[in-house]
Image (tube, grey):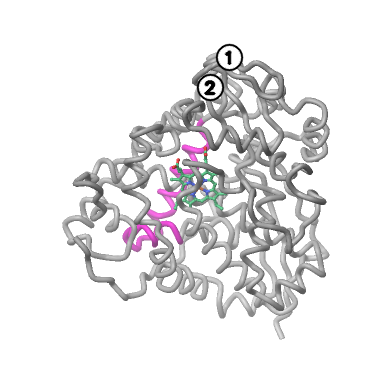
Amino acid sequence: MVQPIVTHTIEPRSIDTSSVTESAFHSVSATYATDDLADPHSLYAQLRRTTPVMKGDILALYGIPSQADYANTGRPVFTLFRHADVAAVLRDDKTWSTDLLKDGLGTFLGEMFLSARNGESHRLLRRLLQPCFAPDVTRRWRTHVIAPLVEREYGGQWRARGRAELMSDLAMPFPILAIYAILGFPDDPASVTQFADWALQILNGPQIDPEKAKASMARAFEAADLLDEHVRGVVAARRRAGASGEELIDRLIRTEVDGERLDDGQIAGIVRMLLPAAAETTTRTLANLMVHLLQDERLLARVRTDRSLLPRALTESMRLEPVAGFLARRALRDLDIGGVTIPAGSAVSLVMGSANRDEAMFADADSFDLDRSQQANLGFGYGLHMCIGMPVARTEVEVAADMLLNLPNLRLDPDRPAPRLHGLQFRGPDAVHLRWDTK
Ligand code: HEM
């Protein structure tokens, strides 16, 4: 059933993300960061040389929740640092399963959590979702949702301000506004803020400290239930209204593959999965890109002058500092990696931040090089589970970065602390103080 394209502009309004959402965001940062490791990249470089297949989980060693064993089952974990090993795992879904993702975050995300599905069940759901994220769909969202949203929220009145703190003023609220508008949520700022906060509570559920975990898991379960209940209401309302629009929920209602369709409960599950996936990651990816650009005058001048370089700059920024710093898989059979025996049932913790700087794959791997080949970058994952929202995320980051680069003489505020990227997982800065000329 092909529906006519709705050409109206979706009009999301401003929301106040200053209170609960901001503190939940910083709490997520703290959960996945460590003060004991200021520069993970030199440690990764050393381990790539000496122990590329390490017995144990480096995240757990630093007290950070790890997908490799969220549920503390005690399964053996190995950490992989080299690009070739990481890519080989991600490419081979016959040997490696994502079922371990059902623990931890997956506990709250349920059956529709695409990342945790494997084989036929993953293939079918991915085929149903894929057309909803097709490049032409994203292009229309760019024109009708994302660009108007950036212009309205951060256009005229922002230019006169002359200063901003990137994270709280733009990078946190903007992806939230964007994903809710793309989904087709009612234009109600208070409930969007509430939904965003529930999504962050879910991300914050897994904790290493059992006492903290008791409280955060209880909050995350409550948040997941509330989110589910409210999202079901939104989906049912859109179905009653005919579901003929451009918005993602309408597309999910209409999508069909070989006679298979999604019911309201399944769509609510998908939306519940997308909310944490879409906001936090995009926030930090935009921030990391801006920090890379603003800390390098020549790079900044080049991209400011030639905006067609923005997509390359984004890819290179994600290579050097991928926000999703670690992925995990579980071995379905015994195997050997680099002379180390990995028994069936073990997990591997894949260090994306290390693989992306592997000198065997990237010449002068630690430098930001706009002209290098864009292939082999693992910032959005690789293989069958590679990020389905990549076109949306890239569009959001590129449109927002383009607007920021239009601010006259945009620079880091010299009177405020320089931004510092931290965190092994969900890596990014807490604050980026910006200045620009107002005349
Ligand atoms: C810059 C922002 C983003 C980053 C860095 C990112 C990163 C990733 C990565 C690394 C994976 C692979 C996980 C794995 O293999 O275990 C992934 C999967 C996924 N992402 Fe994203 N993501 C971003 C934005 C988004 C957005 C905006 C959406 C939705 C609108 C989204 C939805 C998903 C989904 C549904 C999957 C699971 C795909 C599958 O298993 O088939 N992501 N993402």
The quarter of the picture where residue 244 lies is bottom left
Distance from the alpha carbon under mark 1 to that under mark 2: 7 Å
Q: Which residues are magenta?
A: 178-205
Residue positioned 69% across, 75% down in the render: 162
Circle 1 residues within 10 Å: few <14, some 14–19, many ≥20: some
Whether residues under marks 1 and 2 lie with C-beta atoms below 8 angstroms apart, the answer is yes
List the residue tagged with mark 2: 331
In the picture of the structure, the residue carrying the numbered disc 1 is: 343
Count the labels in the image.
2
Q: Is residue 28 left or right of residue 186?
A: right
* Camera-side residue of 194 and 71: 71
Q: Is residue 264 above or below residue 47?
A: below
Q: Is residue 144 left or right of residue 186?
A: right
Mark on residue 403? none
Q: Quadrant of the C terminus?
A: bottom right
Quarter of the image where one finds residue 171: bottom right
